[in-house]
């Protein structure tokens, strides 16, 4: 869940900052590159611990890579908020998002421990009763049918073999 949140927030914050800076919404291969970056950052966040500093670093790295992809697309006119305002907004959003993800992760762990602790213990497994197969019934017609169907009918015709 932490990885999904980091990946989605990476893409959302990157697109928000790009739009705030006056850029157009990306399309085509640029969207695909942004999705790949968000997936990689989300996968990294899922595999590392939920420390706030680590999450903030991953979010910042993802936003930087996303900004590089969107800036390379070339539709950023350069108008909008000044650079220092955008960097401050990105930094504040990164710290806030990392804190919220970390608190949410801690809350989910606490809640699942409480649910697991309140759940009743599972009952002991019941062993299945042994079933006995009865093969004593002899059915000669069925046996003859099985024997007849198991004989191969391939080979030369009877008239040509003489």
Image (spheres, rainbow, N blue to C red):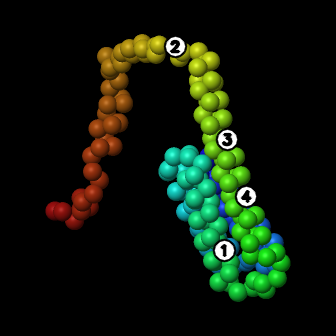
Q: Give the distance between the C-alpha atoms of the residues marked 1 and 4, in whole angstroms.
A: 15 Å
Sequence order check, earlier mark of 1 and 4? 1
Viewer-proximal residue, 116 or 92? Answer: 92
> Residue 93 got which mark?
4
List the residue tagged with mark 3: 104
Q: Is residue 28 left or right of residue 62?
A: right
Q: Nearer the viewer, mark 1 or mark 4?
A: 4
Viewer-proximal residue, 135 or 9? Answer: 9
Q: Give the distance between the C-alpha atoms of the residues marked 1 and 3, in whole angstroms.
A: 27 Å
Q: Give the distance between the C-alpha atoms of the residues marked 3 and 4, in whole angstroms.
A: 16 Å
Q: Give the distance between the C-alpha atoms of the residues marked 2 and 1, in whole angstroms.
A: 55 Å
Q: Nearer the viewer, mark 2 or mark 4?
A: 4
List the residue tagged with mark 1: 67
Contact, CB < 8 Å: mark 2 with mark 4? Answer: no
Sequence order check, earlier mark of 2 and 4? 4
Contact, CB < 8 Å: mark 3 with mark 2? Answer: no
Location of residue 11 by image quarter: bottom right
Q: Secondary structure at mark 1?
A: helix
Sequence order check, earlier mark of 3 and 4? 4
| Residue at x 60% of width, y 34% of height | 109
List the residue tagged with mark 2: 123
Location of residue 16 by image quarter: bottom right
Contact, CB < 8 Å: mark 1 with mark 3? Answer: no
Residue 32 appears in the figure: no
């Amino acid at each position: 869940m932490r990885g999904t949140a980091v990946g989605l927030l990476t893409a959302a914050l990157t697109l928000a900052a790009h739009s705030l800076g006056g850029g157009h919404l990306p399309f085509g291969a640029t969207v695909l590159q942004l999705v790949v970056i968000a997936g990689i950052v989300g996968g990294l966040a899922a595999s590392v611990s939920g420390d706030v500093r680590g999450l903030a670093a991953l979010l910042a790295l993802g936003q930087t890579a996303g900004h590089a992809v969107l800036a390379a697309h070339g539709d950023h006119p350069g108008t909008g908020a000044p650079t220092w305002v955008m960097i401050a907004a990105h930094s504040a959003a990164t710290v806030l998002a990392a804190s919220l993800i970390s608190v949410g992760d801690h809350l989910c762990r606490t809640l699942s421990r409480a649910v697991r602790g309140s759940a009743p213990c599972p009952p002991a497994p019941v062993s299945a009763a042994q079933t006995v197969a009865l093969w004593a019934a002899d059915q000669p017609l069925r046996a003859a049918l099985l024997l007849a169907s198991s004989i191969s009918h391939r080979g030369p015709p009877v008239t040509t073999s003489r």
